[in-house]
Amino acid sequence: MFKHDKLNLFLFLVLVGLQVLGLVALWTQFQWTYLPIMLGIYFWIGISTTLYLHRYLTHRGFEMPGWLKFIFATGSAVALSGDPVTWVGDHRYHHLKSDTDEDIHSPVHGFPYAHMMWLVRKPPGFRDRSLRYAADVRKIWYCRLWERPAFYVLPHLGMAALLYFTLGGVGLLWCLYVPMLVVYNFTWAVNSVCHMPSLGYRNFETTDHSKNNFWIGLGAFGEGYHNNHHAKPRCAAHGLRWWEFDLTRYIIWTLEKCGLAWDVVWPKPNEETAIDTVTEDQAGALLLFGAQIRDPRLDTKHEKTDRRQ
């Protein structure tokens, strides 16, 4: 459906170019002095996507002070993760139409489209449609301001200039564009890999194809436990089992303990052990082969289908 829409060539070149800058860094000399800065920026822009854009702004899983929201919102702008209004509108629409022909980023349209191409092949009028689902976000002054590309790129350009004049061109590539490359692809993998029918595992029966994937969860700060999220979208915790490491959950918990987060939607105690399609014996294998464990329910469904036939 969507994958045949006209390509936004300019946006496509920008997204490819940003990732190429990250790859180019691999052919330059890395200095250990870059490491703390690189990890700090990776943490900032990654958490700004998972904690702010997703769990707070889209699903309102908790509340926090305005100054902290602005810090995280700026982090998402530094990474050019997508202006908040569009990001929230698209994601809420995804939850409404998950894995149907109308889902803007589902593997039902093909893996490449679900991973990145949906960003550059949106059909005419789709933005206006998704904006209806982000009306509350447009009331925030900086989110409304950042709908204009000329203003939205300023935090990124400011950070790029700061790194260039302090660390040089190579330091800029390693400290900004390598983290962006990693954050982009782990974030996109939540839409693609975590909706593939035969990858990962499920804790909950949902009407979509969402899966939990340990490795995506690790790289995307807990976002990879996508089946858990689709089952309970407002829940501030995505990892619900002891092996489902969810860094964003622990940061929200820490903020709550410090009085910087409140009204947090935590899972109820019985929800964390409600369904156990993956046994504790399988958990060890999951840590090593998270993307290869099939959902046991798939085999059950196939068996039922075969019996009917």
Image (cartoon, rainbow, N blue to C red):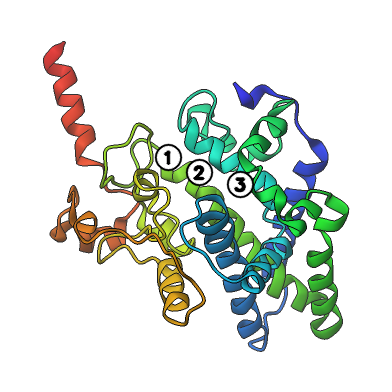
Badges 1 and 2: C-beta atoms under 8 Å apart?
A: yes
Query: Can residue 27 be seen here?
Result: no
| Image point (32%, 55%), residue name | 290
Quarter of the image where the C terminus is located: top left
Side (left or right) of 3 relative to 173? left
Number of residues whose C-alpha sits closer than 10 Å to that of mark 1, classed few (under 14), some (14–19) or many (20 or more): many
Side (left or right) of 244 relative to 91? left
First-in-chain label (3 vs 1): 3
Q: Gap between marks 3 and 1, in whole Å?
A: 19 Å
Disc assigned to residue 282: none
The kind of secondary structure element at disc 3 is helix
Query: Can residue 13 be seen here?
Result: yes
What is the total number of numbered labels drawn onto the structure image? 3
Side (left or right) of 263 relative to 155? left
Against 226, residue 269 (above or below) is: below
Question: Which amino acid type corresponds to the residue marked 3 in the rendered image?
Answer: Val
Disc assigned to residue 195: 1
Number of residues whose C-alpha sits closer than 10 Å to that of mark 2, classed few (under 14), some (14–19) or many (20 or more): many
Residue annotated with mark 2: 191
Residue 184 at what x, y percent from top left? 61, 55
Q: Residue furthest top?
A: 309
The kind of secondary structure element at disc 1 is helix
Q: Nearer the viewer, mark 3 or mark 1?
A: 3
Residue annotated with mark 3: 88
